[in-house]
């Protein structure tokens, strides 16, 4: 699986996460790219704490791969450079990312809450 998303268009994003291997492949992409985006834009986005909670959840070895797949999909969407609303657009560029992250947080419910305070 090619994890270089720099040449992807939004319509090309078609990851199903049907197997643990597919999930793990994009976990590696997230680990390689999340920190630079958070460092660059973390102070500009109000949902950075949510992104970090999802990352901690994704890294938890006790979480099943299919539950991680939900979170991996949201984090990859957050990281891909071309999405529904380009991130470079002032003020509104992260609204689609916020929507995806918020939807996953809401879907995960209380399951994600312990990851807000853990290190």
Image (spheres, helix red, strand yellow):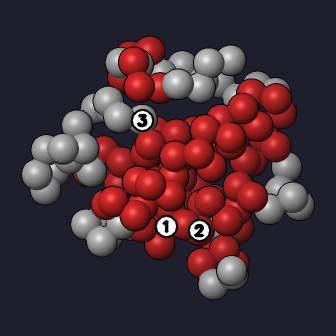
Q: Nearer the viewer, residue 106 or 20?
A: 20
Q: Are marks 2 and 1 in contact (CB under 8 Å)?
A: yes
Q: Are marks 3 and 2 in contact (CB under 8 Å)?
A: no
Question: Residue 39: x and y, percent?
Answer: 40, 64
Horizontal placement of 71 versus 20: left or right? left
Question: Residue 94: x and y, percent?
Answer: 27, 51
**Which residue matches tag 3?**
80
The extreme right residue here reads 62
In the picture, residue 6 is in which quadrant? top left
What is the CA distance from the residue labelled 2 to the residue labelled 1? 5 Å
Q: Alpha-carbon neighbours of circle 3 within 10 Å: few (<14), some, or many (≥20)?
A: many
What is the CA distance from the residue labelled 3 to the residue labelled 2? 19 Å
Discs 3/2, front: 3
User: If the image is split into quadrants, where does the N terminus sit?
Assistant: top right
In the picture, residue 85 is in which quadrant? top left
Q: Are marks 1 and 3 in contact (CB under 8 Å)?
A: no
Q: Mark 3 or mark 2, which has the lower sequence index? A: 2
Discs 1/3, front: 3
Horizontal placement of 32 versus 59: left or right? left
The numbered disc on residue 50 is: 1
At x 59% / y 26%, what residue is drawn? 3
What is the CA distance from the residue labelled 1 to the residue labelled 3? 17 Å
Element under disc 3: loop
The numbered disc on residue 107 is: none
Q: Mark 1 or mark 3, which has the lower sequence index? A: 1
**Which residue matches tag 2?**
53
Q: Is residue 52 shown above or below 3?
A: below
User: Does any portion of residue 96 appear in the rendered image?
Assistant: yes
Element under disc 1: helix
Q: Alpha-carbon neighbours of circle 1 within 10 Å: few (<14), some, or many (≥20)?
A: some
Element under disc 2: helix
């Amino acid at each position: 699986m090619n994890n270089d998303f720099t040449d992807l268009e939004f319509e090309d994003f078609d990851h199903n996460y049907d197997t643990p291997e597919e999930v793990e492949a994009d976990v590696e992409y997230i680990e390689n790219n999340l920190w630079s985006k958070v460092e660059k834009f973390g102070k500009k986005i109000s949902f950075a704490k949510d992104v970090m909670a999802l990352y901690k959840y994704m890294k938890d070895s006790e979480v099943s791969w299919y539950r991680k797949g939900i979170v991996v999909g949201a984090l990859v969407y957050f990281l891909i450079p071309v999405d529904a609303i380009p991130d470079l657009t002032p003020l509104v560029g992260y609204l689609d990312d916020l929507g995806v992250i918020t939807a996953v947080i809401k879907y995960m419910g209380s399951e994600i809450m312990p990851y807000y305070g853990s290190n």
